[in-house]
Amino acid sequence: MRYEINGTTLQTLDIYLDSGDSIFTESGGMAWMKGNIEMSTNTRGGLLKGLARSLAGESLFLTTYTGKAGQSLITFTPEAPGSIIPVSLGNGESRICQKDAFMVAQDSVSLEIHFRRKLGTGLFGGEGFILQKLTGPGIAWVEIAGEVREYNLQAGETMQVDPGHIAMYEPSVNYEIERVKGVKNILFGGEGLFLASLTGPGRIWLQSLPLANLASKLMQYMPTKSS
């Protein structure tokens, strides 16, 4: 199996399936395909797992695509302008992703929900309690709005981040929510009441454009009903 990512702000992901290769995606995630491909849609793990995934922004049903003969092509496109990030995972290796980041993965990858353990992190973390957890072995692809910057935090090294800009991180990274200090900073700083502190060791991926920010900006230009 090989893949190609094409484009800039509106990227496409081409995956070439050899006979026997399988990938899965959320229902309706495929854009176009050619060749001999078998499609199978189910809850992948049962109804309870399907319902749990739906809480993390994915559809109740997942669709598996399997190459049947020769080489076939299947293409996926993101839901918003941004970046498609390949995530290569070893056996038992995981990434924690923002809600609705999952795009497609090899059949060997596990997609689960991930609960933030601390109440404050869940209430004020910008994305709620529920995230997505991808576990290998295999390759998964995630879609992140905007551009993505990757940082490798050393043990004890901390980066403070507006919570909406956190796209993905390794499970070894400690995620805490802290209140902004100073009354003037809270009232006039424009950064909200809380910041996330990410402490290493581990890698983090930050996005330049949280979808919530984009939606808020677009709402300013939406027509309103006249009274």
Image (tube, helix red, strand yellow):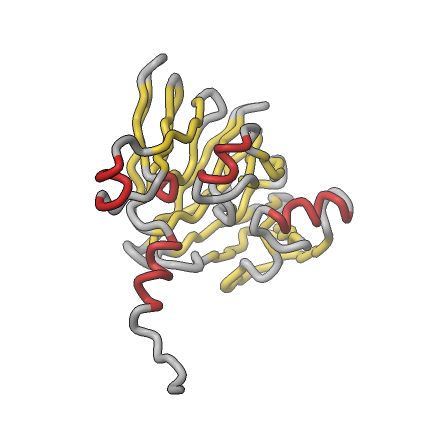
Residue at point 62% right, 36% down? 110
Left or right placement of residue 194 versus residue 45 in this view: left
The foreground one among 69 and 189 is 189
Looking at the image, is 31 positioned above or below residue 207?
Answer: below
Number of numbered tags placed on the structure image = 0
Q: Position of residue 85 (x, y in %)?
A: 40, 42
Front residue (pair 218, 107): 218
Residue appearing at x 62%, y 58% in the figure:
27
Residue at the bottom extreme, as displayed? 227
- Residue most toward the top? 155
As drawn, 221 above or below 209: below
Q: Is residue 30 above or below residue 110?
A: below
* Residue in the foreground of this view, choosing between 227 and 74: 227
Q: x%, y% of residue 119?
A: 55, 32
Residue 97: percent from left, percent from top: 48, 38
Quarter of the figure with residue 156: top left
Report which quarter residue 36 is drawn in: bottom right
Left or right placement of residue 10 versus residue 17 in this view: left
Q: Quadrant of the C terminus?
A: bottom left
Q: Is residue 138 visible?
A: yes
- Residue depicted at 40% across the width and 21% down the height: 202
Q: Is residue 68 visible?
A: no
Front position in the image: 19 or 9: 9
Residue 10 vs residue 110: left or right?
left
Q: Residue at x 32, y 66 (%)?
A: 218
**Where is 170 relative to 68, above or below?**
above
Which quarter of the figure has residue 10?
A: bottom left
